[in-house]
Amino acid sequence: MKRFEGKVALLTGAASGVGRASAERFAEEGAAIFGVDVDDDGLKETAARVAALGGHMEFGRFDLSTRDGCHAAVAAAVKSHGRLDTLGNIAGVSQFHIFSELTEEQWDFIMGVNLKGVAFMAQAALPHLIESQGSLVNVASVAGLIGQAYTVAYCASKGGVVQLTRALAMEYIHEGVRINAVAPGGIKTAMTSKLSFPEGMDFKLIEPYRGRRGACEASEVAAAIAYLASDEARYVHGEILSIDGGVHAGG
């Protein structure tokens, strides 16, 4: 399928994981890509993989935990490609903490990337997405829909993404732009494989989070993002699409 022929997708977190898988998926379907991350080497590798698929990805390093960084990223994408049809707000961080030991610095880091970055990327991109009658797809998490021990900051940030998505969908309901989110459970990515756990953590408290079928592949989340961004989902607006092996259903 070439659902994105002639269209431009700005994808954050493009250096690895779901961001990289999404860049590959959108490129396969004909989109021009602008990838954003803080990992220069990862961005170069993603660009090479996109090229191997016959696509093209411009990219840039931006700090998405600041409003200025978000607006600069969108401006660079529009300058590079002349338009913007899709924003995939994919960049995110995940950390486990015992709540009583959570520091302000750790809280601000998670909130800055996972929620503040999503909000201000959306703010910068929406005028362009309205012009193109395009789509915004945020990456939330099942952690934004049900609670999980030892991830208070992460759950709070992803719960914020869920409500941000719904609130924006209502505010822009008459503007022609579509605003949705995916809410994955466990995903097989480099980020999740490198997670560290605090000493004294009771692993039984996070057992229900492991899903009914194990972790999903990054490509499966990318496929959902591509669907929500495509014209096939023209009547989908304000939706939070769970991809979690049944965790949310049983939560």
Image (cartoon, grey):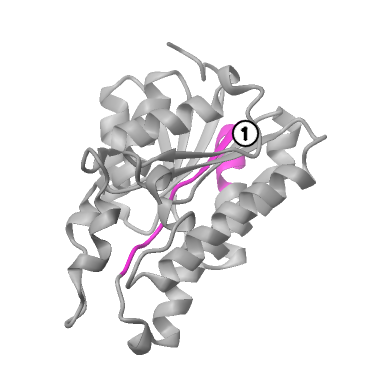
Does residue 183 lie above or below 232 as drawn? below
Query: Residue 51 colored magenta?
Result: no
At horizontal 52% and vertical 34% (from top left) the residue drawn is 9
Task: List the residue tagged with mark 1.
Answer: 135
From the top left corner, tell me how far across and down residue 160 is, in percent. 57, 61
Give 51 or 25, whichever is nearer the viewer: 25
The reply, left or right, for residue 99 in relation to residue 6 is left
Tell which of 237 and 194 is nearer to you.
237
Which region of the structure is painted magenta? 76-95
Q: Is residue 92 magenta?
A: yes
Residue at image x 29%, y 47%? 16
Q: Is residue 72 visible?
A: no
Instruction: Look at the numbered disc 1 and give the secondary structure of its residue.
Output: strand
- Name which residue lies at 21% across and 42% down: 214
Going by the numbered disc 1, the residue's amino acid type is Ser
Query: Where does the image place residue 47, in percent across and percent down from the top left?
Result: 32, 37
Q: Position of residue 231 (x, y in %)?
A: 60, 19
Q: Residue 132: x and y, percent?
A: 70, 29
